[in-house]
Amino acid sequence: MPPLDIRQRAIALLDQIPQNKLAAVVQLLEVLAEPAPQALANPDEAPLLAVIQWQLTAPEQSRLNDLRDRCEWCELTDTEHQELLHYEDRLEQHRVERLEALIALAK
């Protein structure tokens, strides 16, 4: 279910809650809305977590998505195709590094 539908469903359910239970529901929502506490990583884990959490920047991801879409329709120039291959190679290398970091972190 898309997030918007879930939000609309939650709002609709709020309208059905009896007045005497509304304060408890609001308290629960306040607790759920608080950001989860982040456990402090030990200094050895920080570099591993950085590798695990790495992702393309928003402009790079947008460009990659565009190249992938256009590739499906055979609309890429040779230069764009090389750019797409570069992105895919980079992501494959990161998947290897991420897996290595996950294994190291698990140890």
Image (cartoon, rainbow, N blue to C red):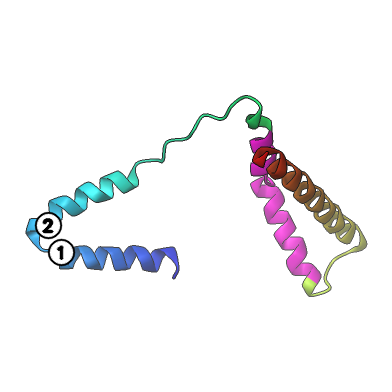
Residue at 32% of width from left, 48% of height from top? 32
Asked whether 100 falls inside the magenta stretch, the response is no
Q: State the CA–CA distance, disc 2 to disc 1.
A: 7 Å
* Outermost residue to the left: 20
Residue 17 - label? 1
Residue 21 - label? 2
Task: For the N terminus, give its image quadrant.
Answer: bottom left
Please determine whether, in this image, residue 41 is positioned above or below residue 74. above
Asked whether 52 falls inside the magenta stretch, the response is yes
Residue at 82% of width from left, 70% of height from top? 75
Residue at 59% of width from left, 26% of height from top? 42
Residue at 66% of width from left, 27% of height from top? 44
* Outermost residue to the top: 43
| 20 horizontally vs 97: left or right | left
Q: Residue 71 at x, y = what percent?
A: 80, 69
**Which of the two residues, 77 or 65, is positioned nearer the viewer here?**
65
Q: Residue 82 at x, y = what percent?
A: 90, 57
Give the amino acid type for the residue marked by disc 1 in the picture. Ile
Q: Contact, CB < 8 Å: mark 2 with mark 1? A: yes
Give the amino acid type for the residue marked by disc 2 in the picture. Lys
The residue tagged with tag 1: helix, strand or loop?
Answer: loop
Q: Residue 10 at x, y = what percent?
A: 29, 64
Q: Residue 6 at x, y = what percent?
A: 37, 66
Give the magenta range. Answer: 48-71
The residue tagged with tag 2: helix, strand or loop?
Answer: helix
**Which of the two residues, 99 or 80, is positioned nearer the viewer here?**
99
**Magenta stretch mostly in which secondary structure?**
helix
